[in-house]
Image (cartoon, rainbow, N blue to C red):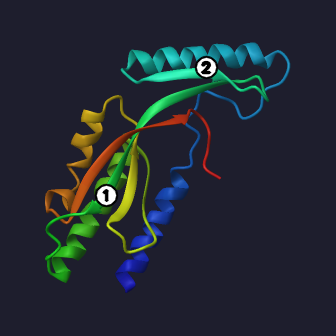
Amino acid sequence: MEKINVYYIILICLLLLSCKDSGGMPDETVGPQLAEKAISTAKLKKSLESQGFKTFDYIDEKTKDTILMQQYFIAFLKSGPNRSQSKAETDSLQALHLAHLGRMYEEGYADISGPFGDDGDIRGITIYNVPTQEMADSLANMDPMVKSGRLAIEIHPWWAAKGFKLR
């Protein structure tokens, strides 16, 4: 039970750290800053697209702001076919799993990861900030829990607005 509590504390810290501003769009814009924001959004869009990311933008009817959407990839970490490891093996895999997720975040490949609060088949998620599903799949399959068969990966494209934070 003590290891589970440490696991949740580490994941909560990762969640809090991942609520960073991904840049490109100020929180509030008024007056002459509107043109500046549009240029920033256009530059960010061009930069993302030059790196292979898929994007689109639209005008928010209420605020009249340009909202830049980016395609991310959400990986569902599901119970895998091999869950027969000993407690010691599971504890070691868990430590390696958390190190892998931390590395993905630190290197900018993943923006947020965390477990689900129930004991269902889907154990957790990671949102990858990479240009292709193939890259997200490759990174997710590097996870020691996936390599061992304890977890399996299911990845889907997912769209979100750049610069918006969790709340």
Q: Are marks 2 and 1 in contact (CB under 8 Å)?
A: no
Q: Report, in whole angstroms, how far the alpha carbon at label 2 lies from the one at label 1.
A: 33 Å
Q: Which residue is mark 1?
A: 77
| Residue 16, image quadrant | bottom right
Residue at 39% across, 72% down = 7
Determine whether, in the image, residue 158 is placed left or right of residue 94: right
Residue at 25% across, 43% down = 139
Q: Residue furthest bottom?
A: 1
| Residues packed near mark 2 inside 10 Å, few (<14), some (14 to 19) or many (20 plus) | many
Above or below, comparing residue 72 to residue 61 in the picture: below
| Residue 95, image quadrant | bottom left
Given residues 94 and 167, the one toward you in this image is 167
Q: Secondary structure at mark 1?
A: strand
Q: Secondary structure at mark 2?
A: helix
Mark in the foreground, 2 or 1? 1
Residue type at numbered disc 2: Thr
Residue type at numbered disc 1: Leu
| Residue 49, image quadrant | top left
- Circle on res. 30: none
Of mark 2 and mark 1, the one earlier in the sequence is 2
Determine whether, in the image, residue 64 is placed left or right of residue 158: right
* Residue 52 percent coordinates (x, y): 36, 20
* Residue 11 percent coordinates (x, y): 44, 64
* Residue 156 percent coordinates (x, y): 35, 42
| Residues packed near mark 1 inside 10 Å, few (<14), some (14 to 19) or many (20 plus) | many
Residue at 54% across, 28% down = 69
- Circle on res. 41: 2
Given residues 7 and 140, the one toward you in this image is 140
